[in-house]
Image: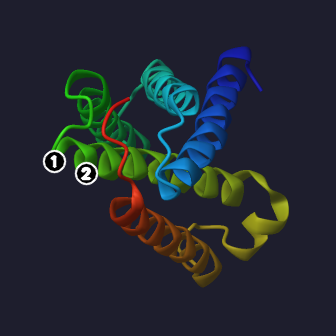
Amino acid sequence: MAPFTLFHVILSLIGIVTGLVALRGWLASQLRPGWTAAFLASTLATTITGFLFPITAFTPAIGVGIITTAFLIGAIVALYVFGLSGRWRSVFLICSTIALYFNVFVLVVQAFLKIETLNALAPNGNEPPFAIVQGIVLLAFLTAGYLSLRRFRTVSP
């Protein structure tokens, strides 16, 4: 693996781990500012470094990167510009959860591409095992996002 690719992967894994820790806090109505900042920064760095790979055509990865970047900007503005006041709390939680979901979505895609056992189950990425795993991930994030919206009441960062 090329050093830049390894750096990109490490950033992505840091974003996922810190995001899951932050999300657990949001579910308990705790902002966890350090974890949240680490999640937002590492996930933004992941999307930025993703755009630095050679681009020869528009791919699903580029689309996911663009969408993730938009949601990250929404989360950052909601938290650091508007301090989660009013509806910005919901904007932050929704945008952050979606950004984390997309990072995990890409992790699952990469796992099915790179891990031989998983690739044997879904070599084209459109077989039932792949769809089932992605469906479970989506349901988990929809549930976590909904619950965080219901539970998170911290008003200021």
Residue 138 appears left or right of 22: left
Q: Residue at x 77, y 71 (%)?
A: 120
Foreground residue, 15 or 91?
91
Q: Which residue lies furthest to the right in this view?
A: 117
Note whether residue 106 is visible: no
Crowding around mark 2 (Cα neighbors within 10 Å: few <14, some 14 to 19, many 20+) is many
Q: Residue 90 carries which label?
A: 2
Q: Which corner quadrant of the image does residue 81 belong to?
A: top left
Q: In this view, does 17 lie above or below 2?
A: below
**Split into 4 quadrants, where in the image is the N terminus?**
top right
Q: Residue at x 30, y 23 (%)?
A: 80
Q: Which corner quadrant of the image does residue 157 belong to?
A: top left
Residue 44 appears left or right of 70: right
Q: Which residue lies furthest to the left in this view?
A: 86
Q: Where residue 93 sits in the image (x, y, percent)?
A: 34, 49
Q: Where residue 37 sits in the image (x, y, percent)?
A: 49, 26
Q: What element carries label 2?
A: helix
Q: Is mark 1 on a helix, strand or loop?
A: loop
